[in-house]
Image: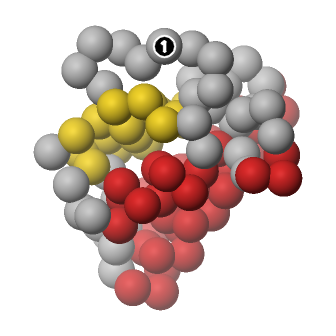
Amino acid sequence: MIKVYLDDERNAPEGWTRVYWPEEAIELLKSGNVSEISLDHDLGNDNLGTGYDVILWIEKEVITKGFKAPKINVHSANPSARKRMELGIKNIIKYSK
């Protein structure tokens, strides 16, 4: 199992796999080998997505396919984006039961 750290600027903590874009994080999530994921929101190019896109993907997979979500953390410094992402995580938890 791996821990995934989505961020364009910060280095990943020891023992984490750093990815730069949502599609990279989603590919790892699809493998079923992610035990924990930590997400930044602003990744330097909104055309390639944000951390919130990963939340939306997990939420959809949980609701429509019974996907087992890993532990999810948000480390974004963007206050409004953090709030929106945390609300998505609440939905993921709600529908995971």
Answer above or below: position of 25 versus 69.
above
Three-letter residue code for mark 1: Asn
Q: Quadrant of the N terminus?
A: top left
Answer above or below: position of 9 versus 83.
above
Colour scheme of the rendered structure: secondary structure
**Residue occupied by mark 1:** 11
Label 1 crowd bin: few (<14), some (14–19), many (20+), radius 10 Å = few
- In the picture, residue 51 is in which quadrant? top right
Q: Residue at x 36, y 55 (%)?
A: 28
Q: Viewer-proximal residue, 90 or 85?
A: 85
Q: Position of residue 35 (x, y in %)?
A: 24, 45
Residue lying furthest left? 1
Q: Position of residue 11 (x, y in %)?
A: 48, 13
Q: Viewer-proximal residue, 54 or 74?
A: 54
User: Left or right of 42: which side holds 29?
Assistant: left
Q: Position of residue 40 (x, y in %)?
A: 62, 31
